[in-house]
Amino acid sequence: MKRILIALLTASVAASASAVADNQKALQAKADSANAKRGVEIGGSIRAVAQLSSFSTDQDPTGINKYPDVERNEFVTADLSFGFRPYETVRANVIMRLGGGMQEYFAAAAKTLEAKWLNVEGNIGKNFYWTVGDFRQELTPLTIYNPGIDIMYEPTVFARKRHMAEKEQLLEGNKRNLQGANLQFRQEIDPMVGEIRAEAFFARVNRVSVLDFSGAEGNILPNDSLAGYATSLAANTDKWLVGGNIELLPMQKNIIVGVTPMFIFDNENSKTYTYRHFMSRGSKPDEFNPDELYDGDEPKSGLYVRQEINPEVGPQNTLVLSARAGADVAGIMQNKNLTLDLVAEYAMSINKKKVLGAADPVSGVVPVVEESENGSAILVNLNAGYKVDDSWSAGITLDVVRNDEKWFNNLAQSPSFFAQRVLNSDKDGNTVKYGVNSPLYSTFDALYHYSPKFSPVPRILQTNDDAFWKGQTESYNIAPYNKNSWGSNVYAKEQLALINMMMDPALQLVLPNGLATANRMGIRALIKGDWQEKVEAQALVSVFNQVKSEFEGIVDKVSYMEFGGGAKADIAKIAGLSKPAEFAASYKHSESTTNMVSGLSGTLKSDFINVGGSFQFLPRVGFTAGFQMINTDYGSILGSIEGINPNVGLDVPLVKSKQMQWMVGFDYTVADNAWLAINFGMINVTNDYNTATLGATTRNLPDYFNKTVKGDGATGVYQHKFSQSVFEASINVEF
């Protein structure tokens, strides 16, 4: 396996370098000709990472936390894409993933070989196109969309890492990964009437996976129970989508009118069960007498109980209907230097759910009834701009949003980023599941790192019969699992509510579910300018409010604001240098203000700074550097008010947080997505907690926190500092 991967990597790098250095167009023409004759196309990507991360803190001098301070992630993933075309009108596509851990080279069982993508596609004539199997879909931000994270002028050294983490999950922009069938029809009528496009799709968008005893693989909060909120990422049934899209593009395709109906539902017959240890939810092994578990040498009955994977979810039954109209005014005017288009979309959702009705006064039986929630969403998008060839360009993008509190479409609201702990997760294994509320969480760790197959250490080293389950954590089983914050999951409504309570305020404060976020109304503006492709600048302003208070009688209203700007300069073009050189910087401020009915208010503020540069000093050999800093002031947020925020690990209020990351390195760059990089960096985090009044649990504080001291004495503030040094070598080649 290792030899095969090395050979493929060497060949792909050499081919890419030759194509870029010599005559790329000629080689591509020859390749196309060969592919046409053979009916076979080969492509893919290779990602390899060797990473060493070291955790350090001065606040555990006696070594209370005895778990490893060092974590090594070494892996290679090769995605080989094959396209087979036996006939002109039929094509089969498959992506085979070969994976292996460098540290497990001699363990054959640690190698992986799987088909990550498989479909058959074809066409009938020039108007009908079909796909069966895996496919990607993106329509509009209110219908089918995979909202992500946008970081203005992200330093190259970090952007590459995020690119690799997303590609590991086969993500492509805002497209959703679906599995089923897609049928498309297009017919050009005439230039004025235009073209009609019709599309139908049937897909499975989520499926219950086989879980371990704790439910860690696929769960948001394994071994936890929150009334009214889902804990399983996969819900407890298969989730399906049936829908269509019809569009008419008259006036030489400069006007669009479209409608999209969709039906999202759960298959109740696919409900899945698992067996869990009866002590697995909130019980401590040392609180039980072993004599209570066994009759002699045999386990007592009921040691494991049969449960639904997630009894509090679904079944979903949601109808979404969207209608939109727009015009490309610049296209109608045939002005190539002008950008002016407007699209308005209205969507409605009817979400049916089963609830408990009123008890019968005679029999006392509580019936299960079905009720509907009707929601609506409005999105208006305007793009306006002007450019002068070889001189300058300027433009503005406006998004006007009005989504009510009952609007629900999880095909557009499920985020692609759900913050997870990655590096040095063994240090806080019991609290990893709490994500942003985990003691050792940092935004940068969740954004930029991943491990396809991580093997954690057991919590207890014993050889008796109880060692297996006593050595497990409360967040995951001691078995290989995937660590990655990125994905294309479609969540249930209860899951979305829980995820939004665990969102990262530095990244997702204003629109955690993209432009389809429920209970939002306001406007977002992005202004962008460019001068001769040498200097580029952007400015962002967003102002939103909740349509309706989520906690009537307690919270009056919640408002959101975001603004920022940045610039990028191509130093090489400005100075006339022969080798690439670029510098960029940006700043963004986000805040939310909660006004209480009582007159009190609290504001959460977060500032995000990015500075980075990349410079080549030899042919293809360059230097990259990046700096990021996040300062968050939580103020008097609602997490400490009983009844507002359920307990998701935020036991002790977080007052302030300061995160800083820097990284420098050298790279050998062949093309945009083909590089070899060696980097070293540091993540530093300082969190201030309000410990004036401590409850019975302090899960979001490190295990070496001394409850008797209450942090900083009389002030009641505990300041927790830790750092992570990261040394890594990475290869990314896409061909």
Image (cartoon, rainbow, N blue to C red):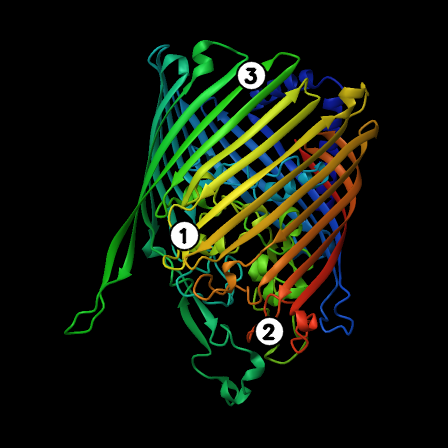
Name the quadrant containing residue 200: top left
Q: Along the polypeptide, which appears first: circle 3 or circle 1?
A: 3
Instruction: Pinpoint residue 643: horizontal percent, then vertical percent.
Output: 43, 65
Task: Report which residue position mark 1 lands on.
Answer: 492
Q: Marks 2 and 3, Cα distance to the nearest angstrom?
A: 66 Å
Dot 3 alpha-carbon crowd within 10 angstroms: few under 14, some 14 to 19, many 20 or more:
some
For badge 1, the amino acid type reads Ala
- 2 vs 3, front mark: 3
Contact flag, marks 1 and 2 (Cβ < 8 Å)? no
Task: Say the numbered circle drawn on residue 468.
Answer: 2
Q: Marks 1 and 2, Cα distance to the nearest angstrom?
A: 33 Å
Q: Marks 3 and 1, Cα distance to the nearest angstrom?
A: 43 Å
Front-lying residue, 140 or 292: 140
- 1 vs 2, front mark: 1
Q: Along the polypeptide, which appears first: circle 2 or circle 3?
A: 3
Q: Along the polypeptide, which appears first: circle 1 or circle 2?
A: 2
Task: Say the numbered circle drawn on residue 386.
Answer: 3
Instruction: Pinpoint residue 250: horizontal percent, then vertical percent.
Output: 36, 15
Q: Residue furthest left?
A: 362
Front-lying residue, 584 or 400: 400
Front-lying residue, 381 or 599: 599
Count up the numbered dots: 3
Instruction: Pinpoint residue 445: horizontal percent, then vertical percent.
Output: 66, 51
Q: Is residue 226 left or right of residue 608?
A: left
Task: Name the element at disc 3.
Answer: strand
Instruction: Pinpoint residue 379: horizontal percent, then vertical percent.
Output: 40, 34
